[in-house]
Image (cartoon, grey):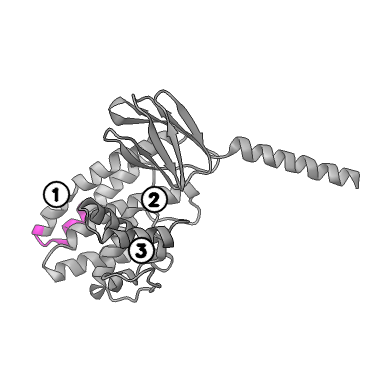
Amino acid sequence: MKHSFLTQVIFYILFFCFSVFSAQKITIVNNTTESFTVQNGQKEVIIKDGDKKEFSNIASRISVIATKNLNRSIIIFLEPTEKLTITIKPGNTIFYTGDQAEINEYLNEKLNVETFGKMKDYLSSISKKNVAELKNTSEIFLSGILKKLKLSAVVVSPEDKASTKKIKNHIKYNWLYTLLSTVSTQKDKTFTQQAIHYYYKKYIESDITQYSCSSIYQYNVIEIVAKNKELLPTDFPTYPIVSPTDSDNINQYLPKNCQKFYFQKKYDYLEHINDPGQDYYKKVLTEKFSEE
């Protein structure tokens, strides 16, 4: 009996030590000349210039906000036991060291530049109304991104680690957004239907029954798809409307965590133009999404 009790005590001590010393950690280093605020989920921490702070229990992203043109959202791509140091330097340049540092740097600092820069090539294919060329151009470009990160495919597989799944989805929906936002603005409905149908069937349909928005790109893509629903021969799941707006016909196809992005985007715009309608969206964000 004593032996059994002692074994349990040792087990819990070892488990506690493993949890403490092997947990995922992010260290933020402030090498700028002013303090900034780091937001991790609902928590905020001020880091003074020359100081650093360590964070555990990381949300999917952190935000770094200061007064001098620094307002960055940094998505974290790590396994549960990995560690990463993010250093903010003068000029608001960001350096990554530690586990998966190169991947985190590429996805946060370079991917957007490349995907949005490619839109001019998509427009060239679209101007020719050449769906085959658009497919070829976009998928060769996607293959190049995957090669940089040593990934063989962008579609998630059950064998992928958690961070790999997150990386793949981030790449896929960033890439799809630049594609579909370009395609969906065209007046040629036949071309738009062919293009959206192709990318939907190949890259989105497998996600649709359990769709979730962990980033603005996933929201943007599902919004575009919902707006062009009549072009797709498929039924979409519907969800309760979090709070009524003039976009209910679109939002009904968005899960709750996707609707959050709608309200945040709308609030940010109305707040920017100082429209009194912002109060409604702020209230919804506070009351309906405060725990997310």
Residue that carries the numbered disc 3 in the rendered image? 259
Is 135 within the magenta? yes
**132 on left or right of 161:** left
Q: Which residues are magenta?
A: 127-137
Which residue is most to the right? Answer: 1
Q: Which secondary structure, mark 3?
A: helix
Q: Is the residue marked by circle 1 packed among few (<14), some (14-19), or many (20+) residues within 10 Å?
A: few
Q: Which label belongs to residue 120?
A: 1
x, y percentage for residue 288? 42, 62
Residue that carries the numbered disc 2 in the rendered image? 168
Residue at figure coordinates x 31%, y 54% from the top left: 217
Q: Are marks 3 and 2 in contact (CB under 8 Å)?
A: no
Q: Nearer the viewer, mark 1 or mark 3?
A: 3
Q: Earlier in the sequence, mark 3 or mark 2?
A: 2
Residue at figure coordinates x 62%, y 37% from the top left: 20
Q: Which secondary structure, mark 2?
A: helix
x, y percentage for residue 253? 34, 70
Is 47 within the magenta? no
- Along the viewing direction, whichever of 1 and 175 lies nearer the viewer: 1
